[in-house]
């Protein structure tokens, strides 16, 4: 059995309908009704509640996310056919009034009820949602006239307009819970509640559209759309636990403002003052999105808004951060050691030691690989996993010294015993280059093996050696086709050309805080990032090997035995802290973005691998409790699989589309 603790000798291995968003005000141009949309025969009805009290006179709109441009944290709102403004779906045919921007709406009655007839326009592939604004929260009772609250905004995800199955549920309960779920699920695509989007196709592929659709699906799965109550588990997986108490707490924060007279109330002023980033929000849905995008900020001040008198119970009174995470068990998960994401947004997990299997989890949280995961094909203590451009999974088997290739459906493509030879000996990490070749690091022999896409050895009988290779662990490929290996024993990084020539000198690159480097990743500029297990730090090297992170590397953020590294679509760096049971986020300049202790939600327990998907969710494998944590919408959507970010024609400086949005 391998020892998952770091040591100074060799270390073997760590590696529907419904949610809601709202609006940010009605002063902007929110987009035009699509000229190609077709009217539907669907009748949608529902109720708008604030703190479980019906809101009277609220305006309920129906929008579709932009298919032209990205929204998201730090992205400015833009309008027009090329902008990220959401598109109004209701038309004059609904028989309802329009606001001053020409967007049509329906109005809730004294019981919060609303009804949208089937005369709205909706095109296949559009991701639709509802939002409500304003209205009287009826603080003195239903039917008793009170003061309208313009700060009260809510929203509910409806889903993809494709086909007769739209929408899956025609009765919607919009409240603070649905707003929280939608804010987190769509955080990677939302500038504000009325600027949500992703281009439907970029550079000939549809990865961005897939990520947006998956995010809407996540929003639908977090909450029972008819009741407006959080689901205890995901609809497709009863072992996937939804953080109900955290959702309730966040909903209570919004309720403190919605159940008030408006912006000047203490609930609203506290909420908005503690969710201010680029601008101060003036409505609850924008505040919810801001919390989702900055879950480590102003935590104690926001938690004070949830009390025993709040409408959603139970709630939490203390937390390290406000991230929203789902924990998965079962499905063959057994000391999971590596995670990779494919182009459809599925997570592939290599289960080390006892189970010798690979678990595949859909973006909706379903186990696609059965109760025990995919087995056979030489899988034996699988330690590393990666996905090629065809959607096939490549797995490094530590004990047998082989590589197994699985089809996207889990069929064995590499024979009964997997690919072998070429110096494969206790392989740890594996990566795919722009030509589809597979590269693996070998703990024994201190070498790197290169296989063709057909599994043919390209690196000679002993693999590539020299260049400072010494117990190499992590492995990554840059845009020039060079392979970079993190040498745990040598506290160095080796750079190999596409033909295996050492480009980093006899001893590899050193400095910059390199100290027991474990995981490694490369950003879009070609810079190299390593997690230093002994140094409790991150090192950044230029593509030429120059240390950019100072003599001690980047520290702080709760880093303790950092192991794995991932880069999201904004170029931010994500690292698992094995000893601290946390995940840290750094900017590309090394600034800590995740607070003093990192993010700790979702059952993190000796986390050792991490991957970001095309919806901005972070997937983390936990060794100690044999689980996987999915943190919803915490990062920026990124191109998946990693190999899809590499150019077909190598660049000279190592630059690529790694660490960029799809």
Image (tube, rainbow, N blue to C red):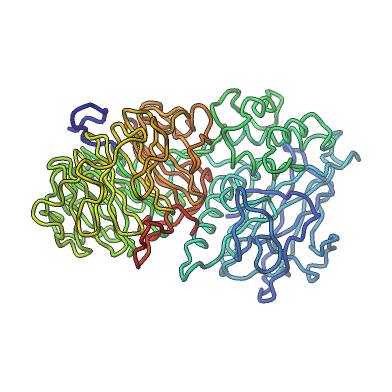
Residue 407 image offset from top left, x and y in percent? 28, 61
Instruction: Specify the farthest residue to the right.
Output: 145
Residue 203, above or below 570: below
Residue drawn 70% across the image and 45% down it: 285
Residue 158 horizontal side relative to residue 60, left or right: left
Give the residue displayed 29% in from the left and 55% down from the top.
482
Quadrant for the N terminus in the image: top left
Residue 210 in the image: x percent, y percent?
49, 61
User: Would you identify the image quadrant in which residue 38 lies?
Assistant: bottom right
Choose between 600 and 107: the one closer to the eye.
600
Pick whichever, 355 or 637, lies toward us.
637
Q: Quadrant of residue 508?
A: top left
Give the image location of residue 654, x and y in percent. Answer: 37, 56
Q: Nearer the viewer, residue 282 or 551?
A: 551
Can you tell which quarter of the image residue 580 is in?
top left
Left or right, residue 231 beside residue 641: right
Residue ID at (22%, 43%): 428
Image-based side of 250 in relation to 583, left or right: right
- From where the camera sits, is residue 409 visible? no
Establish if 57 lies above or below 643. Answer: above
């Amino acid at each position: 059995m391998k020892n998952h603790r770091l040591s100074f000798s060799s270390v073997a291995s760590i590696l529907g309908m419904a949610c809601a968003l709202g609006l940010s005000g009605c002063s902007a141009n929110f987009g035009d009704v699509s000229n190609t949309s077709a009217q539907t025969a669907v009748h949608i009805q529902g109720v708008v509640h604030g703190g479980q009290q019906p809101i009277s006179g609220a305006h309920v709109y129906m929008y579709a996310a932009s298919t032209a441009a990205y929204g998201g944290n730090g992205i400015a709102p833009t309008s027009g056919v090329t902008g990220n403004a959401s598109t109004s779906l209701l038309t004059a045919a609904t028989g309802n009034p329009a606001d001053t921007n020409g967007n049509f709406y329906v109005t809730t009655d004294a019981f919060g009820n609303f009804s949208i007839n089937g005369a709205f326009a909706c095109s296949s592939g559009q991701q639709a949602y509802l939002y409500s604004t304003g209205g009287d929260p009826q603080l003195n009772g239903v039917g008793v006239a009170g003061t309208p609250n313009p700060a009260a905004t809510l929203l509910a995800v409806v889903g993809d307009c494709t086909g007769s199955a739209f929408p899956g549920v025609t009765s919607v309960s919009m409240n603070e819970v649905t707003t929280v779920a939608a804010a987190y699920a769509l955080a990677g695509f939302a500038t504000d509640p009325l600027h949500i989007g992703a281009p439907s196709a970029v550079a000939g592929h549809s990865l961005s559209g897939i990520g947006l659709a998956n995010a809407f699906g996540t929003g639908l799965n977090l909450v029972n759309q008819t009741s407006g109550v959080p689901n205890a588990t995901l609809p497709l997986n009863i072992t996937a636990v939804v953080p109900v108490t955290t959702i309730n707490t966040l909903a209570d924060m919004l309720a403190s403002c919605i159940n008030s007279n408006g912006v000047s109330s203490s609930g609203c002023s506290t909420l908005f003052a503690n969710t201010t980033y680029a601008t101060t929000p003036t409505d609850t849905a924008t505040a919810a999105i801001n919390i989702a995008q900055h879950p480590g900020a102003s935590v104690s001040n926001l938690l004070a808004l949830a009390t025993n008198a709040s409408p959603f119970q139970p709630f939490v009174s203390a937390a390290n951060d406000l991230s929203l995470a789902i924990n998965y068990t079962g499905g063959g998960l057994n000391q999971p050691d590596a995670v990779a994401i494919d182009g459809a947004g599925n997570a592939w997990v290599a289960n080390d030691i006892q189970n010798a299997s690979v678990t595949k989890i859909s973006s909706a949280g379903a186990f696609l690989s059965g109760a025990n995961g995919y087995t056979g094909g030489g899988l034996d203590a699988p330690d590393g996993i990666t996905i090629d451009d065809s959607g096939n999974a490549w797995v490094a088997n530590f004990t047998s010294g082989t590589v197994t290739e699985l089809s996207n459906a889990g069929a064995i493509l590499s024979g009964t015993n997997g690919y072998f030879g070429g110096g494969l000996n206790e392989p740890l990490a594996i990566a795919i280059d722009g030509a589809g070749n597979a590269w693996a690091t070998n703990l024994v022999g201190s070498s790197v093996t290169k296989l063709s896409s057909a599994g043919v050895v390209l690196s000679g009988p002993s693999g590539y050696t020299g260049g400072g290779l010494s117990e190499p662990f992590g492995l990554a490929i840059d845009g020039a086709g060079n392979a970079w290996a993190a040498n745990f024993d040598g506290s160095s990084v080796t750079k190999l050309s596409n033909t295996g020539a050492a480009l980093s000198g006899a001893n590899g690159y050193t400095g910059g805080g390199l100290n027991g480097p474990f995981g490694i990743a490369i950003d879009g500029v070609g810079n190299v990032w390593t997690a230093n297990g002994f140094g409790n730090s991150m090192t950044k090297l230029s593509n030429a090997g120059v240390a950019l992170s100072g003599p001690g590397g980047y520290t702080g953020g709760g880093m303790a035995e950092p192991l794995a590294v991932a880069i999201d679509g904004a170029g931010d760096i994500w690292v698992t802290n094995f000893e601290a049971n946390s995940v840290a986020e750094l900017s590309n300049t090394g600034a800590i973005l995740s607070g003093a202790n990192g993010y700790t939600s979702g059952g993190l327990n000796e986390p050792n691998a991490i991957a970001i998907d095309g919806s901005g969710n972070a997937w983390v494998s936990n060794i100690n409790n044999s689980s996987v944590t999915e943190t919803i919408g915490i990062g920026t959507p990124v191109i998946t699989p990693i190999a899809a970010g590499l150019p077909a024609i190598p660049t000279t400086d190592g630059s690529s589309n790694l660490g960029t949005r799809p």
